[in-house]
Image (spheres, rainbow, N blue to C red):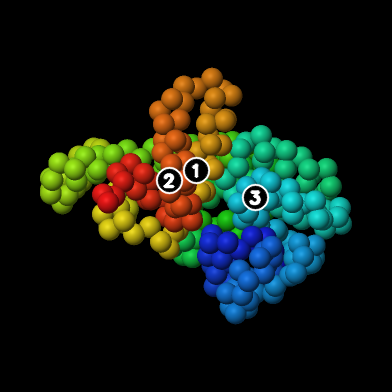
Amino acid sequence: MHLSLIGTGLMGQALGERLLAEHQSLTVYNRDHSKTSGLAALGAKVATIPGEAVQQAEIVLMMLSDAAAIHSVLQTLTKADIADRLWLQLATIAPSESIEIGKQIKKLGGRYLECPVLGSLPEARSGRLILMPAGNQSDFESALPLLSMIGRDPQFIGETGQGAAMKLAMNQLIAGLTASFSLSLGLVEKQGIQVEQFMSLLRESALYAPTFDKKLSRMLDRHFDGPNFPTKHLAKDTRLFLSVAQSMGLNTQGLEGIAGILDKTLEMGLADTDYSAIYAAVNPASD
C-alpha cells in the first residue's frame, strides 16, 4: 500500500513514524519542509508540493491544523490529483466543515472518510489511537487495514459529520476536566493541604480521571514545555465546540467560562505549551 501523509507537525510526525514502522511506502508533505526531515531519515519520500505527494498514493492522510489548512492544500490540487484516491481527514474540525470538504473531494472524483483521532504522541507511535471514522461504509471497509495499523478496534461511527462531532465531544471533556482539576488543585495548594493526600482521596473516588495524574507534575512544577497537545489547539477545538453546540441550542455557559480561561492562557504567552498550562491561568504564580 502506498500512502501519502500531508501535515507532519507533532501528530503527523508520530503517525508517520508508525506507518514506516509498519513498513508502508510513504510520501510526506509539509508546508514547512524542515518538519519532514525526521521522517525522511526513517525512509519516507519527501514531496515539495502537495500534488507531488499524492501521485502514487492509494490513500492520502491529512493531518492538518484546521479546515482552512485543508482547503489551502486542496486548492493547489488538480482533479487528476484528487480523483480515484481515498482521502482520510484526521484533524479536529466542525461537522459542517468536514461535510463541505467531503463534497469538494467527491465532486472531483475522490472518496472521503473523516477519521478524527483521540490520543497523543505515544498512542500515535504505538498504533493505539482511538479513531472516529465516518462517511461511506465501503470506504471505511477499504481503509480498515490502514486504520487497524494506527488505532485500536476501529469502529464505524456513521455518516460524514458524526465522526467530527464525536471528536469535538471528546475534546470538550479535555478542556472541562483539565480546567476543573486545575481549580481544585489550586484551592488545595492555596489552603496548604498536602497535594498527595488530596490525590490519594481523589484516586479512590468516582471523581477520578487518569488525566489528573498525567498532568499533575506539570501543574505542580509549572513545566509546560514539550507538549503532546498544545494549548492553542485545545483553545481552537473549544471554540469549535461552542459554535456547533450553540447552533444546536445547547446551553454552553460552563464551557464559555473555560474558553475564557484558555484565552487568558494564550495571552500569557503559553499558546505552544502543553494544555496543562491552563493551570497557570487558573492559579497564577506568586511574584
Q: What element carries label 3?
A: strand
Tag 2–tag 3 contact (CB < 8 Å): no
| Precedes in sequence: disc 1 or disc 3 | 3
On screen, residue 251 versus residue 206, left or right, reads right
Tag 2–tag 1 contact (CB < 8 Å): yes
Residue 139 is at least partly visible in this image: no
Residue found 52% across the figure and 48% down from its top: 233
Q: In which quarter of the image is residue 63?
A: bottom right
Location of mark 3 (residue): 89
Q: Which amino acid does label 2 sit on?
A: Thr
Location of mark 2 (residue): 265
**Horizontal and vertical percent position of residue 10:** 53, 62
Residue 220 is at least partly visible in this image: yes
Q: As rendered, which of 63 and 141 lies closer to the eye?
A: 63
Which quarter of the figure is the N terminus placed in?
bottom right
Q: As rendered, which of 85 and 171 lies closer to the eye?
A: 171
Q: Which mark is residue 273?
A: none
- Can you tell which of label 2 and label 3 is closer to the viewer? 2
Depicted 65 relative to depicted 20: above or below: above
**Farthest residue, direction top:** 249
Q: How far apart are marks 1 and 3 (CA)?
A: 20 Å
Q: Give the crowd class for mark 1: few <14, some 14-19, many >=20 residues within 10 Å.
A: many
On screen, residue 14 versus residue 107, left or right, reads left
Q: What residue type is labelled 1?
A: Ala
Location of mark 1 (residue): 235
